[in-house]
Amino acid sequence: MEPIRKTLILPHIQLSYLEWFTGPEPVLLLHGLGDHARVWSDLAIALGDRYHLVALDMRGHGESDKPTQGYTFTELIGDLEALLDHLGWSQVHGIAHSWTAKLLPIWATAAPQRLASMVLVDPFYINKMPGFVNFTFPLLYKVLPFLQGMGPFSSYAVAEAKARTLNQFQGWSSLQQQVFTEGIEQKADGSWGSKFTVPARNEIFQESVAVSGLTAPIDIPTLLVQPEQGINRRASNLKTYQTYLNQLQVERLPGNHWPFLVEAEHFNPAVIEFLRLHPLANGREGDG
């Protein structure tokens, strides 16, 4: 099933999102840094028409607006609240990856009534980072594999050749190719590069260093997906989640930081089963 692309027009920003099905249980899908809504296509189709699925292009990404500033967690949560109000959803299942899997617990702490459950897919470092990390950002921007896909590249072919070497595109499936194609564009100077912008990258990293993702107990049922080759692969990485998430389930799965793109045959059933065990209390009453 091909999703429908829609636009939410707010006073200071326009946000683009994909929508699949219109079932009784709303699900909000949030992509990681540098990605866009299309990464969730396989999962959305696997979940099927029991759910009403919306995947947002976060500001600075994909087809959404790309302001030069405004990427704090507070502003991002404002986008999510506005989207839910627009959709008439009072409560959702939230599924988030990497950086937005740090955003989701922050939102749950501030507004726990909004989330019926959370699926956190290999979250970006959940704790506040040491201040010295700021000095390593220029180096990180150059060496982090997923950021190497930002470009600029001299041609589309050169950009694709680079993408084929990146972890999120292992296997180069039809979905991975589509994710790549929809995430790149030709720039005004003729070069090719990601639709993800440098201002978004810089402010998101700065914000993630300065803010802790978990600061108070959360009673929402939560699935933490721990890929075997992800960034939370060690048992010690789980301590903070175990401290604050009172209804935590950890699922260790094959794959790297992008299990929904490289190991969907393992990832999708785990999420489907978790959501089956934690249905929205009132079905369609979760809407509006």
Image (tube, grey):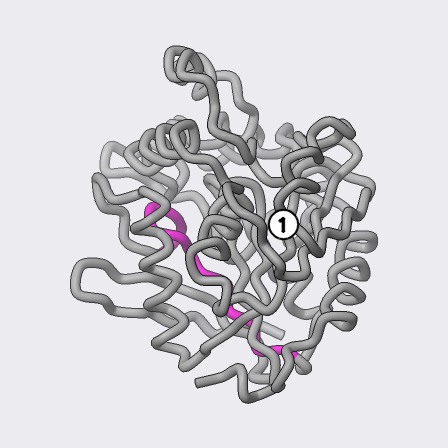
Q: Position of residue 211 (x, y in %)?
A: 41, 34
Q: Determine the image quadrant of residue 11.
A: bottom left
Residue at screen point 38% across, 41% down: 196
Residue at screen point 64% across, 28% down: 165
69 above or below 249?
A: above
Q: Is residue 123 left or right of residue 171?
A: left
The boundaries of the magenta stretch are: 51-63
200 above or below 236?
A: below
Q: Is residue 268 left or right of residue 133?
A: right
Amino acid found under the numbered disc labelled 1: Leu
Residue at screen point 66% across, 40% down: 243
Q: Answer few, some or many: residues within 10 Å of disc 1's Cα (few below 14, many 20 plus, some between 14 and 19).
A: many
Task: Report the front residue among 237 and 180.
Answer: 237
Q: Is residue 32 visible?
A: no
Q: Position of residue 111 (x, y in %)?
A: 44, 62
Q: Position of residue 116 (x, y in %)?
A: 59, 69
Residue at screen point 50% across, 57% down: 108
77 above or below 52?
A: above
95 above or below 91?
A: above
**Residue tagged by mark 1?**
120
